[in-house]
Image (cartoon, rainbow, N blue to C red):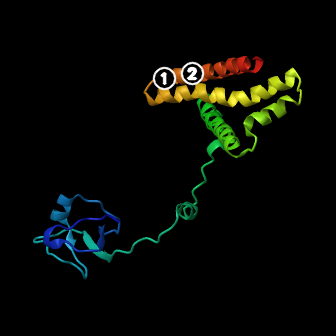
Amino acid sequence: MFPVLLKGNCFRNNVAFKIFNTNRSLLFPSIAYLNRRVTYSGKNTCCKCPGAGGNNTIVFQKYVPPPKKSHDDKNMSLDRPMSPHLTIYAPTLPAMTSIVQRITGIIVTFYALLLSGGSLFLSNGVETYVSMIQSLDLNRLSIFIIKIILGAPFVYHYFNGIRFCMWNAGRWLAMKDVYETARKSFIATAVVTFIFAIL
């Protein structure tokens, strides 16, 4: 259907029409072509075109709005395939750093809530429970592993957060810089976490 806006006294509300030639194929003429070539016919014709001729006819139809469908229903009715998303794409370093950044952000937020909640609601304070953990007399290897598990999310989130801040400032946006800073953030995370763990 080719909508045409009738100007001036030819304007009709809620009216749409089709433009056909003699073999019933749909035409898409310009407005100037309409003014020269088409003839107006039909029950709701609102104006006359003096000297009109040719083999084209405007057929008026009452506008019928399409039925409302949700996004998923429309796609299923048109047999559109579902987007496969991550199932067909190979993981890339920028994508992985972004995903890990969000995971570590959740972990660091949990740290903050745990410490603040413990300070407010635990009867003996956080220090008492730290002393209880120290009294377990864990060996150095166990303490080293626990420190790495607890410290790595915070350290990674810190260094990779610097990358995000620089991106927001319009820096390090070239693909070479994106990959290089991602590798550097992983290296810095490993080194700083190791230093914290051995202290």
Residue 113 screen position, x and y as percent? 65, 42
Q: Quadrant of residue 186?
A: top right
92 w.r.t. 193: above or below: below
As rendered, which of 27 and 197 lies closer to the eye? Answer: 197
As rendered, which of 93 and 132 lies closer to the eye? Answer: 132
Q: Which mark is residue 181?
A: 2
At 77% from the left edge and 17% from the top edge, which residue is drawn? 198
Residue lying at the far front in this picture: please name it.
Answer: 124
Q: Which mark is residue 172?
A: 1
In three-dimensional space, the C-alpha distance between marks 1 and 2, rounded to whole angstroms, equals: 8 Å
At 81% from the left edge and 31% from the top edge, which residue is drawn? 131
At 75% from the left edge and 44% from the top edge, which residue is drawn? 123
Q: Label 1, secondary structure: give it.
A: loop
Relative side of 38 to 65, left or right: left
Identify residue type, mark 1. Answer: Trp
Identify residue type, mark 2. Answer: Thr
Q: Which mark is residue 88?
A: none
At 69% from the left edge and 17% from the top edge, which residue is drawn? 191
Residue lying at the far bottom in this picture: please name it.
Answer: 43
Q: Label 2, secondary structure: give it.
A: helix
Quadrant where the image shows the N terminus: bottom left
Q: Earlier in the sequence, mark 1 or mark 2?
A: 1
Badge 1: residue crowd in 10 Å (few <14, some 14–19, many ≥20): some
Residue 7 screen position, x and y as percent? 17, 67
Residue 89 screen position, x and y as percent? 63, 38
Q: Are marks 1 and 2 in contact (CB under 8 Å)?
A: yes
Residue 88 visible (yes or no): no
Quadrant where the image shows the C terminus: top right
Residue 17 visible (yes or no): yes
